[in-house]
Amino acid sequence: MTRSSVTSRPGPAAGTGRRRRVAARTRLDFWFDAVLLAGFTLAYSYGFTGIGIHEWLGIALGAALLVHLTLHWDWVIRTTRRLVSPAGHDKLIWAVNLALLAAMTLCVVSGILISRVALPFLGIYPLAGPFWDRLHILTAEVTLALVPVHVALRWRWILRVGRRLLTWRPARRRG
């Protein structure tokens, strides 16, 4: 089997197009991030999901946040080391990501602490009180403000990878 037959995939119309090669790790990052964004949007739509789905989705997003951080840990270390250099864009992305991590962590933790469906279902009765309710709402709103900033700062990467994953280009003819 030749290399071209491995990478060649039928196109949408004529069956002669193929997708551009994208590293498996980049594909994973792109689709995982897309699922995180969709999950966050759905979880924030409390009126649409209701409390049960909101809580279970929030717990799942907390776990996904840990996976996301693990997947990007090399970037965290590399960028943290570069903070002493004058690269302003990296510093801004790092600061937004740190704030987003803190807000999302507090949102998930406070959400778990005020759980009224998910944890009681498991036989766990967490804390309740106005402090935790207010913290959960505040950190959810901060997260809601930071997620679009995070996406905007990574927009070029999203477009570049999205184009490579989602567009077809004609297959080259070998002759």
Image (cartoon, rainbow, N blue to C red):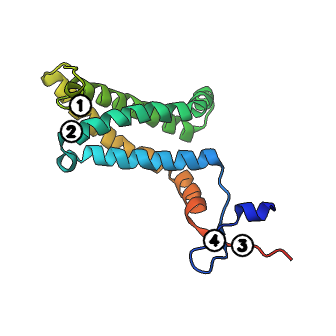
Residue 32 point in image, percent of width and height: 48, 45
Measure how far apart labels 3 and 4 are at the Cα level. 9 Å
Which residue is depicted at the point 62% across and 81% down?
Answer: 14
Marks 3 and 4 in Cβ contact (< 8 Å): no
Q: Nearer the viewer, residue 101 or 64?
A: 64
Q: Which residue is mark 3?
A: 171
Measure how far apart labels 1 and 4 are at the Cα level. 44 Å
Q: Secondary structure at mark 1?
A: helix
Q: Which residue is mark 1?
A: 118
Measure how far apart labels 3 and 1 are at the Cα level. 50 Å
Q: Which residue is mark 4?
A: 10
Residue 64 point in image, percent of width and height: 43, 36
Left or right of residue 8, residue 59 in this image: left
Measure how far apart labels 2 and 1 are at the Cα level. 6 Å
Which residue is depicted at the point 67% across and 76% down?
Answer: 16
Q: Residues within 10 Å of mark 1 (few under 14, many from 20)?
A: many
Q: Callout 4, which amino acid?
A: Pro
Mark 3 vs mark 4: give the one in front. 4
Which residue is depicted at the point 43% across and 34% down?
Answer: 65
